[in-house]
Image (cartoon, coloured by chain):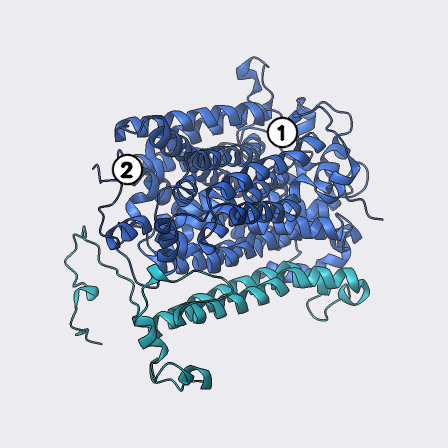
Chain colours: A cyan, B blue
Amino acid sequence: MANEPHTADEIRTDGGLSDVEREEQIDYMDVEINLLKPATPFMRDHLRVIWIGFAIWALTTFAPITMTRLAPDVMTSQIPMIGFPLHYFLLAIVGPGAALVLSVWYARKRDQIDEKYGIEQSVVDPETTDSVSDDAAATDGGISE
Amino acid sequence: MIDSVPLLADSAIGAMGDMVLQTDEGLLPEGLNVSFKLVPSIIVIGMMLLFIVAGFMFKVADTDDMWVAGRSIGNIENGMAIGANWMSAATYLGVAATVAISGVYGLAYVIGWTTGYFILLIFMAAQMRRFGKYTAPDFVGDRFNSDTARALAAITTFLIGFVYALGQARGMGLVGMYILGDWSAVTGGALTAYQTMMVVFMVITVGYLSLSGMLGATKNMVLQYVILISAFLIGLVVTGWSAGYTTILPQLEYGMMIESLGTEFSAPFAGGSYYLWIATCFSLVFGTCGLPHVLVRFYTVKNERVARWSCTWGLFFISLLYLSAPAFAAIGTALYGDQIGAVYGDPGMTSAAGDVLVVLAAQLAELPAWFVGFVAAGGIAAAVATTAGLFIAASSAISHDIYATIINEDATQRQQVLVGRLSIILIGALTIVFALDPQQPIAALVGFAFSLAAIVLFPMFFLGLWWENTNRPGALAGMTTGIIVWFIPMLNEGNFGLIEGGLGIEAIATWMPAIGSALVGTPIVFAVTIAVSLVTSEPPLRTKQMVRQCHSPDPMPKDMTAADVVAEKNGNRPETPADD
């Protein structure tokens, strides 16, 4: 959102332009795509989410088995109530579950970023035959809520 | 020191001893009641007819529909299609089998085959949609401006489809035997019971697929997902309940059973070393991100947002099954141990019995035949759906990427569709021939395909989308290296009888097992591609702009590709004028 409080370094050099305004002046044909050095505010926001997600993913995917290798006794102890050995639970249930939760988190984060930069995915289907009014056709922003 | 040779290979060979694999004993799962069963047969035949009818209803004649379903598929529908496409016999049958036989090592499959979708989601799904071509080799060819690269990718796609389909064919044959019984007499004894069933089901799959193409396949996949997930979940709950092990939430309750299943079931590294676990999991994760038939599902959606959410939905639908498979394995292991014999040790459970454990468990729990048949039908639906997706990807590689783009540039849509159908028949025939004598359990066969995808295609997709300076020489060098690297452990272990008995080099078997060769191979291919790209000239600006366009947040029309947008912005007409 545009009136979100700016962090210190955002106000520093851009002559008062917000992320969103700067983003509008950027033509993606001219910016280099770099995983480690995002060139635009949008890319920076997006890559931050990607890297955070990736780091958590790496932990939930590979850490349990690694810990089991390093500390087998602790990791194979039984969890009270549900009976699973700890490592089995982390591998069979937490691992896949974490990826699912992360995916939902990412998709929502990405939607929020889209919203911040006013990006709307077109849903107009030129071949549509139904007569339901098409929200995306309202170019004057007159969508009733 | 834990033995590092892949356990799957070990258990398959170990369990069968010196038996010749072609004999029925080798592929006859012990304890499975092989006989003709009326109601289950009706269920399976009805289901296959339903697929063919759905295929007919959505029969297609033009290439857009054949390959990307007119880019009209929505969120949840695509999510289900992703699920059905994904959940092959390897998931439905193979995961439970591997967890049962290899214990904690089997969980590498559970994690690898689910969490890979997250990597796909954050790094590739939406960008691929923006690139907007027809097939995975199309991406490689257009991104790297090279028909040779396109051909290499197409050959890899074909090879992946073929290796992957072997596992599916094995699953169809094994389950088919349970339902339809021993039909080997029909062939005059030339084929065994397993072989006959495998051929029957493969022929049906190929038949329906060559009629319907991708649109029919997408509609069918939703149907197939519903059938397979309900068969699996209901099968699990009912089996666990009537055997007295679990009640309504077996996915958590099986924790209480683990203690009693023998240390092999849960002891870490009893079924495979730490290294093998990591290598397998790595291969499966990055193979997921390189599989052409998975990526093509993101070409079929309206826009990037749908690509993202349908990927998430897909993972949800997939997780339902993966969280349940270990529970099925636990229940199946307990039942097998009670009624047939020791699961572990010598002789232990064979890989053939493991591969039908899901069906076997329902049978051992003394459920009615129609119900066991229903569970079995789910397995067949899974195998058919995935084979469909694979064959579509493989045939579009041949007809679109090799035939229409390289061999005959003026090919009409009619000709392309015809070549597409012929290539489906070709790959079907190849699969049938090689699946007559499968030497590995389902999950292992499929694992080889994942290694190939992770080594050869994933680096091309990833670097192609995220590093604009990747160029043609880099891609060619990388892919060639990748294909060679993938073959090394395959030859070493003698898979598919490439070299009888294999080379058996100890160090390669330990550090680069075929099933997890991507852990070594993928970084090598990355390094080669990057190094060659750095020492050769940068790709043309137009190509770089295409990459940038894939990352732009600006929405783009659903019928345009990144290349079109670039051409338009530069004031040129699209370089391939629309010919339709």
What residue type is disc 1 on?
Pro
Instruction: Give the answer, above or below, for where B151 lies relative to B283.
Output: above
Location of mark 2 (residue): B57
Instruction: Residue at 52% x, 36% y: name it.
Output: B160
Residue at the top extreme of this rendering: B188
Instruction: Residue at 50% x, 54% y: name it.
Output: B318
Q: Is residue B458 visible?
A: no
Instruction: Give the answer, above or below, for where B260 lies relative to B90.
Output: below
Mark seen at residue B77: none
Chain where mark 2 sits? B
Chain where mark 1 sits? B
Q: Earlier in the sequence, mark 1 or mark 2?
A: 2
Q: Of helix, strand and loop, which one carries label 1?
A: loop
What residue type is disc 2 on?
Met
Q: Is residue B123 left or right of residue B508?
A: left
Q: Is residue B417 visible?
A: yes
Quarter of the rendering occupied by the N terminus of chain A: bottom left
Of residue B64 and residue B456, the one placed in the foreground of this image is B456
Location of mark 1 (residue): B438
Disc 1 with disc 2 on a shared chain: yes
Of residue B314 and residue B234, the one placed in the foreground of this image is B314
